[in-house]
Amino acid sequence: MTTRVLLVMQKKMLSDMLIAQSVNDTRFEFSAEPRYASAALTAEACLPEIAVVEIPESGPWKSAEKCLAICDVICKQLPGCKQVILCSENDEDSYHAAIQAKKTHRIDDFLFYENSAHYLLSKLEALL
């Protein structure tokens, strides 16, 4: 069975790499949404089992709370959808917010950009 994953991320190179690495991997079917304001609509359209939301290192969506709010909206729309935050291990505010969100069960997990794609895919598989 293929798991649908929505990637809400500003880092196009990273989302493209994940999609390319999964071409021969039937476990996942990725959709990418670089426009954070459209994330909820895209989630409604593609019905992901997992949503990965990046907290970018710059730009208008750099706020961890804004990104967690996207997770909240997707969770309300699709209650069974697992929520994962992706952030930099060098951004203390973001990773502290991700840790707190995990502790309070606001998200299901978090990952760092700096992890390998293989590790990220294995963590996504473990969520199912």
Image (spheres, rainbow, N blue to C red):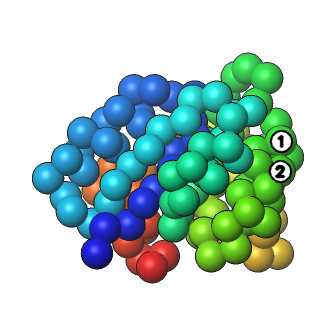
**What x and y, as percent, mark residue 8?**
58, 41
* Amino acid at circle 2: Ala
Q: Secondary structure at mark 1?
A: helix
Front-lying residue, 96 or 45: 45
In the image, is residue 96 above or below residue 82? above
Residue at image position (28%, 75%) is: 1
Q: Position of residue 10 (x, y in %)?
A: 57, 28
Whole-angstrom CA distance, mark 1 to mark 2, is 5 Å
Q: Secondary structure at mark 2?
A: helix
Point out the image quarter for the C terminus.
bottom left
x 79%, y 56%: residue: 73
Q: Residue furthest left?
A: 24
Residue type at tag 1: Lys
Check if mark 1's residue and mark 2's residue have beta carbons within 8 Å.
yes
Q: Report whether 106 appears left or right of 50.
A: right
Q: Which residue is mark 2?
A: 69
Q: Disc 1 designates what residue?
A: 66
Q: Position of residue 76 (x, y in %)?
A: 78, 66
